[in-house]
Amino acid sequence: MFQILVPLPVVSILRCTAVCKDWNSLIRSSDFVSHHRRSNASNRPSLLLRRCGEAPDSGEIEEEFTLYPDPGRLSSSSSIEISSPFRANSDDPRRLRVFGSLHGLICLCDNYKIYAYIIYVWNPLLQRFIELPRPTLTYRNMGNRLYLESTGERPRRRDLENVNYLFVVLGFGYDSRRDDYKVVRIVYPQSAKPPPRAEVYTLKERCWRGIDYAERVLKSCDVPEIWSQCFVDGTIYWPAKVGSKLNYILAFHVSDERFSRIELPKELAGAGEPKRISISETKVTGLLTVMYRTASSYEILVKKGLGSAEDSWEVWGLGRMTSCASMIAKPMKLSDLGCQVWGYETGAQLMLLITQRA
């Protein structure tokens, strides 16, 4: 039975959980999940949409997840509604931010306090999630270090009230050497001291630990407050800046647990407002996509040969969105289906616009 079920697509697997208790237990086992992920790694990815906002009639906060197994058919007849397990864990679901997805796992954080203490890894199909333990880099222990380095004295509680932090950056990736998933967390203090620090959580070890020698790279560049991350070929990427200039992409190599920088092409290096950069992966292996917004358009560049001496950038397409220029727009995903999937917000609704690739 194991070998029969493993090759099945996601929708069929989901239906099989309702056949009997034995099938349900088998499909929810970690061994089956791992085998199914590996056997279906080359299949067309599914699209999970999250809608969260106030209901027009009651004013209550509503959160809905809809799974589209085939992104080429965004219709209600081909979708699956998935209930949210986080309503009981958060006073306001709008605080939850989805910052990473990989192999059917979704990584979310409660962004309300900006410190990102509450982090979840969720399997929406199996309706199972884990809440990660509290990180080791917290407001209190980094505040103690900051005050000690600036004054030479141990701080009292009231001394820490003026110690503020800029923000926390998160990333989600897969370690192919150890068959393990990792969450990386970067803490950027508002002050020059202490320097940025980073820690990593692994699902197999189930604990946080510091990343050695991370400060050397992190203190030379910042990830902007409006950040995005993606995972491509064993590496997590974020847009990074020096001062107010967007000059680099920060990279975290998941298996080696080390940071590095990638210089942006001349079209983007030093780009300030009104350009904003977001990055994502394509379905094509080894391509890192950089999208940057001008006043009326999105332009797309693709980096080939990641990690090789022949690294190069090329313009892959242009996403002109003049009709949406007045809205808050952000590209969601590039696919290999000959189209781009864009998402933009208007009020409390998430809209989709699918356009042909240039």
Image (spheres, grey):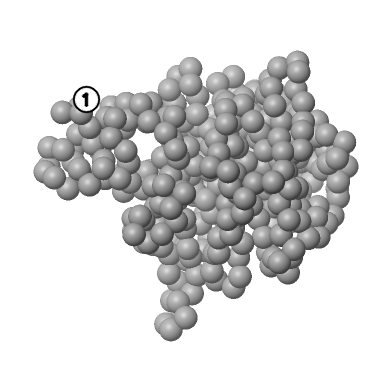
Q: Choose between 133 and 269: the one closer to the eye.
A: 269
What is the x, y in percent for residue 245? 86, 44
- Residue drawn at x 12%, y 42% is 21
- Residue drawn at x 68%, y 30% is 251
Instruction: Judge left or right: residue 70 versus residue 27.
Output: right
Mark 1 lies on residue = 3
Task: Say what amino acid the circle numbered 1 marks.
Answer: Gln
What is the x, y in percent for residue 319? 71, 51
Q: Would you place residue 268 above or below residue 95 in this image? A: above
Q: How many numbered markers are drawn?
A: 1
- Residue drawn at x 23%, y 36% is 27
User: Is residue 197 among what the camera can see?
Assistant: no
- Residue 60 occupies quadrant: bottom left
Instruction: Judge left or right: residue 80 versus residue 146.
Output: left
For label 1, the crowd category at 10 Å Cα-Cα, with few meaning under 14, some 14 to 19 and many 20 or more, is few
User: Is residue 305 among what the camera can see?
Assistant: yes
Q: Would you place residue 296 above or below residue 195 in this image? A: below
What is the x, y in percent for residue 291? 71, 45
Q: Would you place residue 58 above or below residue 335 in this image? A: below
Q: Choose between 97 and 340: the one closer to the eye.
A: 340
- Residue 249 occupies quadrant: top right
- Report the residue that reaches farthest toward the bottom: 57
Instruction: Judge left or right: residue 198 versus residue 129.
Output: right
What is the x, y in percent for residue 203? 42, 31
Q: For the residue labelled by badge 1, is the local secondary structure a helix, a strand or a loop? A: helix
The N terminus appears in which quarter of the rendering? top left
- Residue drawn at x 49%, y 42% is 101
Q: Choose between 340 and 10: the one closer to the eye.
A: 340
